[in-house]
Amino acid sequence: MTAAQYFSTDPDNARRMFLAACLEARLPVASFEAPRDECDEFPVHIDVAYAGAPDAEIALVVCPGSRMAEGLCASGIQTAALRAGLQTELPNSFSLVLVHTVWPSTFEEISLDDSCESTAVAMEWDDSILAAADFRFNEDNAKTKKPTLLEQERQKWYRRVLADVAGRFLNSSRHLVFIDVQTGSGPYGEAEVLSCHLPESKDEARAIKMFGARGTANGVAITNLQGPIARGLAAELADRQTTAVVMEFGCYSLTTVFDTLLSRHELEVAGRNRIDRLFYPAAMDWRERVWAGAANILRLGFQSADHMDLNS
């Protein structure tokens, strides 16, 4: 199979391919399934695979962003990484933790205010924010509704799972490197790395040194762009040194995104449990470009071991 064939549009198939790749690579996997009722079309799973020494000083964690499209994109990258044997390239001081779920938006139901860095920098509209504004607005409106008993049970489950994952897979590491997979407007299939830290901080400087991350967009600081899973795991281990970046892949131009969002909404077109190709193109060449960019970024993270200063 080519790398593009590991990118699926079907949640069940995406999970099957990921677990099969973990089995082939002989990696231990912890799997969790959220509480559900008969009205749920699909179960919500989160699977975590671990590669590397159990006492690795540095853990590189690959997580999906916030949307289903980003969960599927992250799934393709994670599966392709294992099939390509990237886990065998890990330095001795590194572990690779792959957090797999096609439903990252469900973790938004947890209140993660404690995990966000405070900033006095005024946020203005830039390309990445504008592209997601319509989706986020409706998502935030949904959060104002009083949660049902099942939703309350799920919120407790989400917290327990993140605490469990942090304790089992990240607790022994002194430094955590989070790579959050996201898609949005931008050059077709091109990867960009964005720092999630406060401007001019040591953490931002480290993200730039490790990945060549961009710290500002049009003169405006980029902070707190991570998806809910990366934020939640970081909050569970707030005493650890952390380098957090977003690995974002362009899908279409901003004009195309707005023309589409103004006439139709992702949830209305695709349904709650389906995707809009606007943020996850089906073209094989797009997926090949995404994998090539992701592989380069992951290897940059691996190579950073030689100059990582864990005391800074």
Image: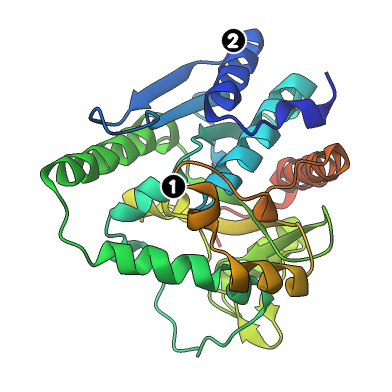
Q: Nearer the viewer, residue 128 or 179?
A: 128
Above or below for 30 versus 95: above
Above or below, 225 against 248 in this view is below
Classify residue 124 by image quadrant: bottom right
Q: Residues within 10 Å of mark 2 (few under 14, many from 20)?
A: some
Crowding near pointer 1: few (<14 within 10 Å), some, many (20+)?
Answer: few
Q: Which residue is mark 1?
A: 272
Colouring convention used in this rendered image of the protein: rainbow
Give the mark, 2 or 1, whose residue is nearer the N terminus.
2
Res 137 quadrant in image = bottom left
Where is 246 relative to 116, above or below?
above
Q: Nearer the viewer, residue 298 or 92?
A: 298
Q: Where residue 230 appears, x then y in whole percent?
A: 47, 50
User: Percent x, y for residue 188?
Assistant: 84, 57
Q: Which mark is residue 23?
A: 2
Kindly tell me whether residue 53 is visible in this rendering: no
Q: Is residue 266 left or right of residue 284?
A: left
Up-down relation of residue 165 to residue 298 (above or below): above
**Which dot, 2 or 1, sits closer to the camera?**
1
**Viewer-proximal residue among 298 and 6:** 6
* Distance CA(mark 2)–CA(mark 1): 31 Å
Residue under the point 84% across and 41% down: 292
Answer with left or right where residue 129 lies relative to residue 140: right
Q: Quadrant of the N terminus?
A: top right
Q: For mark 1, give the secondary structure.
A: loop
Q: Quadrant of the C terminus?
A: bottom right
Q: What amino acid is at disc 2?
A: Leu
SS at badge 2:
helix
Q: Is residue 51 visible?
A: yes
Mark linked to residue 29: none
Three-letter amino acid code at disc 1? Arg
Instruction: List x then y, in percent, for residue 261.
Output: 61, 69
